[in-house]
Structures are given as C-alpha cells and as structure tokens.
C-alpha cells in the first residue's frame, strides 16, 4: 500500500459589497478568494434586487477586491 499525504496551504480573503439602505449598510454581494499555489475569486449575490439596482457599486467593489487579492498574491511571492 502506497500512502502519500498531500498538504496544500491556502489563505482565504473575504469582502462584502454593501450599499446604504435607509441609513443601514446592507450587503448586496459577498466576495471570496482562496489564495495558494493558484487562486480563485468567487462572489455570491445576497439581494438580487439591490444587486441589480447597484451593479456599478458592485463592479467597483469587485475591481477593488481583485486588486487587493492581486497585490496580496504578489507580496506572498516576494
């Protein structure tokens, strides 16, 4: 019997895209990235109606999140 242990190290980075609704910060989407040898970016919509109404806010937040993950990943390599 051949036994092998494979260990992967990942770091999870999370963000929340929010909008102000009647003075309350309300999530429209959650963003997540798993950073390791490879990394991915996912998002899930929390409120479809608010998301559609505020798509430009989400896109700006997503771009900012992607830039953060990219910089974080570059810093890991150094």
Image (cartoon, rainbow, N blue to C red):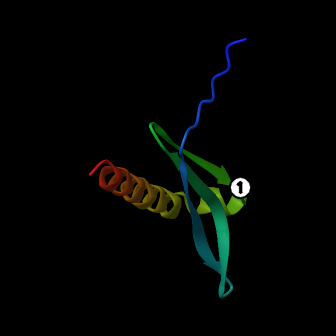
Residue marked by disc 1: 48
Number of numbered tags placed on the structure image = 1
Who's the residue at 65% across and 88% down the image?
23
Residue situated furthest front in the rendering:
1
Who's the residue at 60% across and 50% down the image?
43
Image coordinates of residue 22 in percent, x first then y, are 69, 85
Element type at marker 1?
helix
Who's the residue at 47% across and 56% down the image?
62
* Foreground of the two, 3 or 69: 3
In this rendering, is residue 15 above or below 66? Answer: below
Q: Residues within 10 Å of mark 1 (few under 14, many from 20)?
A: few
On screen, residue 33 versus residue 52, left or right, reads: left
Q: Which image quadrant: the N terminus?
A: top right
On screen, residue 18 versus residue 67, left or right, reads: right
Q: Quadrant of residue 52?
A: bottom right
Who's the residue at 63% across and 29% down the image?
5
Image coordinates of residue 70 in percent, x first then y, are 36, 51
Residue situated furthest top in the rendering:
1
* Foreground of the two, 47 or 17: 17
* Foreground of the two, 12 or 55: 12
Image coordinates of residue 75 in percent, x first then y, are 31, 56
């Amino acid at each position: 019997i051949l036994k092998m242990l494979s260990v992967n190290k990942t770091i999870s980075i999370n963000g929340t895209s929010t909008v102000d609704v009647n003075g309350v910060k309300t999530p429209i989407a959650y963003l997540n990235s798993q950073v390791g040898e490879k990394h991915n970016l996912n998002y899930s919509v929390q409120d479809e109606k608010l998301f559609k109404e505020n798509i430009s806010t989400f896109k700006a937040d997503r771009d900012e999140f992607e830039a953060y993950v990219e910089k974080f990943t570059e810093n890991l390599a150094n």
